[in-house]
Image (tube, rainbow, N blue to C red):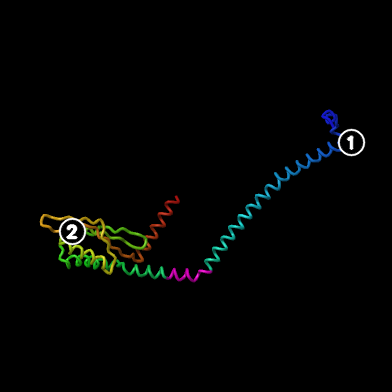
Amino acid sequence: MTLDDLKRLNPRDIGNWPVLPKLGVLLLALLLIVAASYWFDWRLQAEELAAARQQELDLRDTFRRKKGQAINRDAYKKQLADIEQAFGAMLKQLPNKAEMEALLTDINQAGLGRGLQFTLFRPAQQETMSEFYAELPITIRVIGAYHDIGAFASDVSQLSRIVTLNDIAVSYDKEGNLTLDAIAKTYRYLDQSELDAQKRKEKDAKAGAKK
């Protein structure tokens, strides 16, 4: 069949067309139907199927994770109990508000006991508040022999309460004495009223941030 024969075909009388043109039209119609079905129906179903498969993978991962947590539940409970015990032991090393004055006296006595001379012992006017504890920096300057100052630093580290020496600077005077300048930081745990005040402060800060 030539191109002229195809041009002479009557599109209104497809039933009388030869076999080959009929097959061509049927094939074209089939392709159009398949393309339309994919675009308007199968494509959406494929996307839904892909989303469902991804959801299945996520659920499997969640199941495996929760199963592992359930299997290790006793171990997690023991770990939590150990953490709470360790936290309680650390809190016991922090004095409360009433014991702070005695701790300051202990730091002073540790220096005097080693024969050191305090030329400066100045606790900060205001504590630095954290979530569970307060930090009090104390500016100190002591004069004495090298070994006595070393022993004093060791004594401070072995106090029953937590005390750290920071920003340490050492110098010698003309007489050969050693001068130690440092910031001794000690900590205390907050009482219930202070904890409540901290929580209110954090709550107000979050409310202000949302505005």
**Element type where label 1 sits in the image:** helix
**Element type where label 2 sits in the image:** strand
Q: Is residue 94 magenta?
A: no
Give the quadrant of residue 171: bottom left
**Residue type of the residue flagged with mark 1:** Asn
Spot occupied by residue 165 in the image (x, y as percentages of width and height): 25, 60
Circle 1 sits on which residue? 16
Residue at (31% x, 68% y) in the render: 93
Nearest to the observer: residue 33 or residue 87: 33
Give the quadrant of residue 116: bottom left
Q: Main secondary structure of the magenta part?
A: helix
Spot occupied by residue 164 in the image (x, y as percentages of width and height): 27, 62
Q: Which residues are magenta?
A: 71-81
Circle 2 sits on which residue? 120
| Furthest residue in direction top, as rendered | 4
10 Å crowding of disc 1: few (<14), some (14-19), many (20+): few
Could you tell whether 131 is left or right of 173 in the image? right
- Distance, label 1 to label 2, CA atoms, is 117 Å
Query: 110 above or below 206?
Result: below
Nearest to the observer: residue 93 or residue 74: 74
Could you tell whether 146 is left or right of 55 in the image? left
Query: 159 above or below 42?
Result: below
Which-is-in-front pick, marks 1 and 2?
1
Could you tell whether 206 is left or right of 40 in the image? left
Marks 1 and 2, the one that precedes in the sequence: 1
Nearest to the observer: residue 130 or residue 200: 130
**Residue type of the residue flagged with mark 2:** Leu
10 Å crowding of disc 2: few (<14), some (14-19), many (20+): few
Quarter of the image that includes the N terminus:
top right
